[in-house]
Amino acid sequence: MHIFYQPEDNVFELEEEEARHSSKVLRLGSGDMIYVTNGRGLLQTCRLNVQGRRVGYEVVESQLIEPRAFSVSIAVAPTRKAERNEWMVEKMTEIGVERIDFITTEHTNPETLNRVVNLGRLNRIAASAMKQSQQFYKPIITVNNKYESFIKNASSDIKLIAYVPDQNRVDHVFTRIKKGTGTTLLIGPEGDFSEREVALAIENGFTTVSLGPTRLRTETAAVAACHAINLAQIL
């Protein structure tokens, strides 16, 4: 059955975009069965009741899907192009991520921040990616996090920063993961973290890690890190 997203627990009607997709694209009608999730683990089996443009539903069965035994949080400086940030959110959601926090660093251009990070649009992309990948938890997404306050308040079991000083050997992120724990990993901007920012992260319990021998774009680094953490947890 098809999965739809309704974040409000006490509303038994699909939102406009979801309703249009169900009736115009999927050609579903009254009596057809669908799944509905609130993005917080609730999965409902529902029977449609279509009245014109309004698509309501009756809940037939409900179940709560348990969250994963581990968590992945990626804190990343936004790229200078909105479509790259959106691609990054989509792919990390498909792979599996509990939080995506956009952070502002010394090399982040504040003038372009609102143009390239649209929280409403990012949440819609994450919801779509969640449904497409058949998951029932939508990642929490935050924006405009000041770097210094963010790292001081990070509370994961494992705290990592993707940074490799010149000519220094740093362990790959894959080797630093412990199963069944929460991990927060910092990804820098296109100009990378400043030395002061790296030192501040280390002072607050972060460990430097590598994402491999090649230099990656910010959005590629975030997706690669997300995949590596997930892989280390399930292997």
Image (cartoon, rainbow, N blue to C red):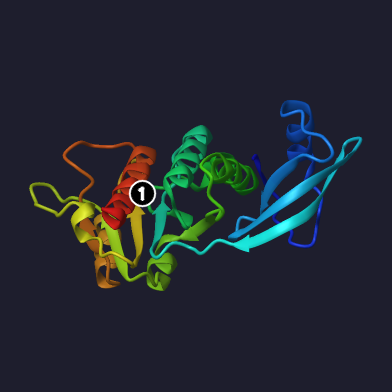
Res 2 visible: yes
Residue at the image point whose x is 39% and y is 58% from the top? 72
What percent of the width, then of the height, locates residue 45? Answer: 69, 52
Residue at the image point whose x is 65% and y is 47% from the top? 120
Query: 195 or 96: nearer the eye?
Result: 96
Q: Is residue 98 above or below residue 206?
A: above
| Figure disc tally | 1
Which residue in the rendered view is the most extreme toward the right?
52
Q: Is residue 4 above or below residue 199?
A: above
What percent of the width, then of the height, locates residue 144? Answer: 53, 56
Q: Quadrant of residue 158?
A: bottom left
> Label 1's element?
helix
Q: Quadrant of residue 195?
A: bottom left
Residue at the image point whose x is 74% and y is 61% from the top? 9
What percent of the width, then of the height, locates residue 1? Answer: 64, 40
Residue at the image point whose x is 77% and y is 39% from the top? 32
What percent of the width, then of the height, locates residue 40? Answer: 60, 60
- Is 188 left or right of 125, judged from the image as shown? left
- The amino acid pointed to by label 1 is Cys
Res 188 visible: no
Query: 150 or 129: nearer the eye?
Result: 129
Q: Quadrant of residue 25?
A: top right
Query: 160 or 58: nearer the eye?
Result: 58
Q: For label 1, count other residues whose C-alpha is less than 10 Å away and answer few (under 14), some (14-19) or many (20+).
A: many
Which residue is identified by label 1?
Answer: 226
